[in-house]
Image: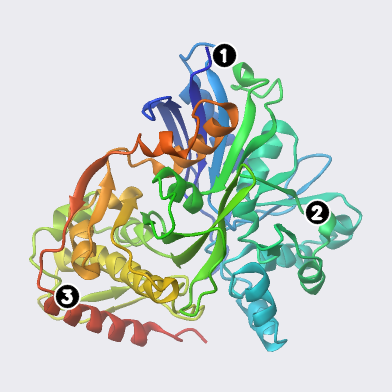
Amino acid sequence: MASYILALDQGTTSSRAIVFDRAGQIAAKAQHPFPQIYPQAGWVEHDPMTIWDTERLAAAEAIRGLPEGSIAGIGVTNQRETTIVWDKATGQPVYNAIVWQCRRTAELCEELKRQGLEERIVSTTGLLIDAYFSGTKIRWILDNVPGARQRAERGELLFGTVETWLIWRLTGQHVTDYSNASRTMLFDIHRLCWDEELCRLLRIPACMLPRPVENSAVYGTVQPGIPGLETLAGVPVCGAAGDQQAALFGQACFRPGEAKNTYGTGCFTLMNVGTEPVRSRAGLVSSVAWSVGGRTTYALEGSVFNGGSTIQWLRDEMRFFNESCDAEYYAQKVKDTGGVYLVPAFTGLGAPYWDMYARGAILGITRGTGRAHIARAVLECIAYQVTDLMLAMRQDAGCDITALRADGGASVSDILMQMQADLLRIPVDRPTMVETTAFGAASLAGLACGLWRDTEELAALRRSQRVFLPQRPQADCDDEYRLWKKAVSRACHWAE
């Protein structure tokens, strides 16, 4: 009997596959990292075929040893906004995937602002004009790859974010779920369809766009003959969501006012705001959280471009240590940062600043500053950035957030979680099963194929591993946060 769900979790630095059983427990998993491509300063790319190959290999390893026919359905979650354009007939990408972090279209975004399009885009899509989102990335490919625009206008090219690319490779169907569509800057989040005028303004042929679909539905079945995935032939692909919306779902934030933060490569704070989108006045964006059974739920979101990637930078570029977990080891050797503040604006600053020209800075260094102080400053800068988002979210939502549910790789840091609770003055709840992004995708697929009945059954599966409560005096935390804001002001508007 089919009693497992396979979740494909395609992230910014690795492709993973996780098999969940009906109790929401992990039965098997596999992971394959892949290289980042930096053609020039501020540009970030991935090879789309490497994305597919690593995800396919991870899936093949995860299901190895499971009885044939035991996978009831497949859910897909993905790094959002990352943009792929490929040939409809051959399946070959016309250019590398342009990653969500990439800032190459910053000047095009400035031009759209000069044209007075901000209100039109915000009111329709819920998004601000920024190089972060997919629309200007598509435009860049069409404008800069020889022949791409002509081929797109002839209907020969397809666009997709990463979940679209994977579903197309698996099933041959060209679809995108509402949550990913709402991150393109082309999608009307009120009518749940592509906006023809925005496509025209950005000079993007509508024929290359995928069909928008609900987050929990059968999109197609796995085609036979995919190497390593032969036993999955005929299995429905029936759930999809962008990684952050998937994590909100996987954290069982099913009621308005419930919020989570994913401490991943970036940091992403989302709050369920119910069945009507909330217009942000504090630099946040509104997106579709999910649409299940004809009912659409919306989220307020704030994005930090560099969260866990700051730890990776300290490990890989600065060579402070060999393993990411060593950041915690060094940070606990000192009681504080010694006045050091690190602003990780490597690719600009996201919400609530939206400064494409900010750049990274380390401030407050003295002759006594050592490796441990900077390691601690890296962990603390993640907590400060999430605090920026949460304060903006409280302002927009008009209600308090009584707890924050935490997940993602950096959430294993007790120092970071405690710092977060102290700054926000609310409990920070870390779950026992931290693979909430993958579980969100699995949950959406499991609802579609009948493995789980409803969200109440899913909510009952969540368990807290530890809840961090505020400990330090609020006055001390407020003073440190004030200095953080001062440090950010020094990093803003740096690049010319």
Q: Secondary structure at mark 1?
A: loop
How far, Cα to Cα, is label 1 from label 3?
Answer: 54 Å
Indicate which label's residue lies in the foreground, 2 or 1: 1
Question: Which of the marked residues, 1 or 3, is nearer the chain's N terminus?
Answer: 1
Pointer 1: residues within 10 angstroms few (<14), some, or many (20+)?
A: some
**Residue 321 visible to an observer of this rendering:** yes
Residue on which disc 3 sits? 477
How far, Cα to Cα, is label 2 from label 1?
Answer: 35 Å
Q: How many marks?
A: 3
| Drawn side of residue 116 relative to residue 394, left or right | right
In the rendered structure, which amino acid carries the disc numbered 3?
A: Cys
Pointer 2: residues within 10 angstroms few (<14), some, or many (20+)?
A: many
Pointer 3: residues within 10 angstroms few (<14), some, or many (20+)?
A: some
Depicted 101 relative to depicted 322: above or below: below
Which of 129 and 179 lies nearest the eye of the viewer?
179
How far, Cα to Cα, is label 2 from label 3?
Answer: 50 Å
Q: At 48% from the left edge and 65% from the top edge, which residue is drawn?
A: 300
In the rendered structure, which amino acid carries the disc numbered 1?
A: Gly
Which of 441 and 114 lies nearest the eye of the viewer?
441
| Drawn side of residue 3 relative to residue 144, left or right | left
Residue on which disc 1 sits? 69
Indicate which label's residue lies in the foreground, 2 or 3: 3
Q: Which quarter of the picture shows residue 232? A: top right
x and y, in percent, of residue 90 in the image: 81, 39
In the rendered structure, which amino acid carries the disc numbered 2?
A: Met
Question: Which of the marked residues, 2 or 3, is nearer the chain's N terminus?
Answer: 2
